[in-house]
Image (cartoon, helix red, strand yellow):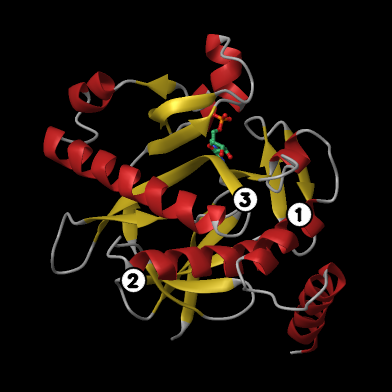
Amino acid sequence: MKKGKKLYEGKAKIIYATNDKNLVIQYFKDDATAFNNQKKTTIEGKGVLNNRISEHILSNLSEVGIKNHLVKRINMREQLVKLVDIIPIEFIVRNIATGSLTKRLGIEEGTVLERPLIEYCLKDDKLGDPIISREHILTFNWLNEIQLDWIDENLSRLNDFLLGMFRGVRIKLVDFKVEFGFTHESEKNQIILADEISPDTCRLWDTLTDKKLDKDRFRKDLGDLIPAYTEVAKRLGILHEQSNVSVVNVTRLSSVKRKKK
Ligand code: 5GP
């Protein structure tokens, strides 16, 4: 598979064309951003860990019939994925109240929700990704009713699957954000899950201690982001006895190799 020109650069990933018009390469950067890009840094090794964790989760989702863009992981930082037109909506599912939900509605931090709560945000950095209602989505034809119902049903299945997967490794799935897109393949207008599912896009708390094992370590200046993401990868059985140091070393090694070429 030949890597072509850069098609799009986002905050945490870059998309490159390939010689197959329906497939693209998704490159995971080490950049971390928060609060609508106001806080930025680079955390060496983050992209490598997110690539591995997201590959693990998305390939497990394929096995339970939740269609997604992943074709295969290519190397430490890249995945081959299906080209999609991303739907400009962030789909958020919450099991425990925290983050913007507590700020917006005054719900007490840590409240276990009686049932999972789905929220929609418009994917627009300039507007600060505002929360929108189902009626906005239908009124502005971002999706029709059948498509939105289908996504809601899949969000519910996805939440059940992820809750179980993380519970099995002593992690609470507090909330997460996912994105969907329309494929370009023969079955046109098919909606599939895209982007990534990783500690960058989920809130993950240790079951016993409530220690944060996700991007809130960066957002809240808690430090030790790489050890936390490594812990998630180890518990999921992705990184066996590899230490934090070895993830960073592999990153360094691959960048040295690239420079030598
Ligand atoms: P909140 O709305 O509380 O800030 O975020 C809810 C959930 O969605 C969290 O798991 C958070 O990580 C995720 N999320 C919301 N917006 C974004 C975003 O723009 N980027 C990333 N990586 N995650 C987001």
Residue drawn at (61%, 59%), measured in percent from left and top? 169
Please state which of residues 128 and 170 is positioned toward the viewer in this rendering.
170
Q: Nearer the viewer, mark 1 or mark 3?
A: 3
Q: Which residue is mark 3?
A: 171
Please state which of residues 154 and 71 is positioned toward the viewer in this rendering.
154
Q: Position of residue 90 (x, y in %)?
A: 42, 37
Please state which of residues 61 and 55 is positioned toward the viewer in this rendering.
61
Q: Residues within 10 Å of mark 2 (few under 14, many from 20)?
A: few
User: Hey, what amino acid is under mark 1?
Assistant: Ala
Q: Which residue is mark 1?
A: 228
Q: Position of residue 29 (x, y in %)?
A: 66, 60
Q: Which residue is mark 2?
A: 63
Asked whether the beta carbons under mark 1 and mark 3 sit within 8 Å of each other, the answer is no
Q: Is residue 86 visible?
A: no
Residue drawn at (59%, 45%), measured in percent from left and top? 172
State left or right for residue 219 relative to residue 110: right
Q: Position of residue 260 (x, y in %)?
A: 80, 88
Quarter of the image containing the C terminus? bottom right
Q: Earlier in the sequence, mark 1 or mark 2?
A: 2
User: Hey, what amino acid is under mark 3?
Assistant: Ile
Q: CA distance from mark 1 to mark 2?
A: 27 Å
